[in-house]
Image (tube, rainbow, N blue to C red):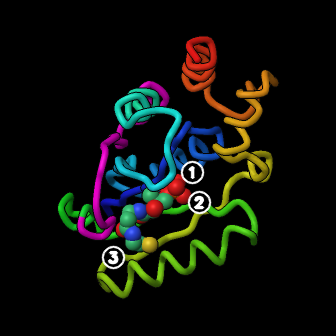
């Protein structure tokens, strides 16, 4: 199975890394796909987000990092993926995720959305909370992989 794991990854968190590791185990190839033009204005540009993910996923053989734009199902089709992976942290994620999954199914019935639950220890982590803590000078080192921690500290220093 070729799967795509899409997201903003602004920045990648330990929750994302956990999902990538779990998804990589059950897929032949996993493409972690970073959304280029999100309506949210990202802290990191797409190149920075792709680079950080590449560093973080270096040791995982069947994982590739890419950027995408436009409709996710079209991107999935273009790379021959027949599954979309999304992580679920808690029931609060469900409504939005279910809406996206059904919309994507309406767009392409051949691409299946698979949900993987995040390890409980990461269930409270989100990229938005990480950014808020970073902006306010708090310690977020237990929420992100080392590469993202360094990049966030650099970004804070240059702001
Ligand atoms: O990490 P995020 O921000 O929760 O990821 C959201 C993402 C990138 C999966 C979603 O916004 C997306 O798929 N965008 C591409 C546009 C698209 O296909 N929209 C229709 C399906 S809802």
Q: Which residue is mark 2?
A: 87
Q: Which residue is mark 3?
A: 111
Say which element carries label 1: helix
Of label 2 and label 3, which has the lower sequence position?
2
Label number found at residue 19: 1
Q: Residue at x 30, y 70 (%)?
A: 73
Residue 78: x percent and y percent? 18, 62
Viewer-nearest residue: 31 or 48 = 48
Is 32 placed above or below 74 here? above
- Quadrant holding the C terminus: top right
Asked if marks 1 and 2 touch (Cβ < 8 Å), the reply is yes
Is 148 placed above or below 81 here? above
Is 108 placed above or below 158 here? below
Say which element carries label 2: strand
Residue 47 located left or right of residue 135: left
Region rendered in magenta: 55-74
Q: Residue at x 34, y 40 (%)?
A: 65
Using the rendered view, name the quadrant where residue 87 is placed: bottom right
User: Can residue 33 be seen by looking at this rendering?
Assistant: no
Q: CA distance from mark 2 to mark 3?
A: 16 Å
């Amino acid at each position: 199975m070729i799967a795509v794991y899409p997201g903003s990854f602004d920045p990648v968190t330990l929750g994302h890394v956990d999902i990538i590791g779990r998804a990589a185990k059950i897929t032949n190839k996993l493409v972690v796909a970073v959304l280029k033009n999100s309506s949210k204005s990202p802290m990191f540009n797409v190149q920075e987000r792709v680079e950080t993910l590449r560093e973080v996923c270096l040791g995982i053989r069947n994982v590739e990092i890419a950027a995408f734009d436009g409709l996710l199902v079209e991107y999935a089709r273009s790379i021959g993926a027949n599954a979309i992976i999304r992580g679920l942290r808690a029931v609060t994620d469900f409504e939005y995720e279910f809406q996206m999954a059904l919309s994507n199914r309406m767009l392409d019935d051949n691409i299946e959305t698979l949900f993987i639950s995040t390890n409980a220890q990461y269930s409270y982590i989100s990229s938005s909370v990480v950014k808020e803590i970073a902006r306010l000078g708090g310690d977020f080192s237990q929420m992100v992989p080392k590469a993202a921690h360094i990049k966030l500290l650099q970004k804070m220093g240059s702001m």
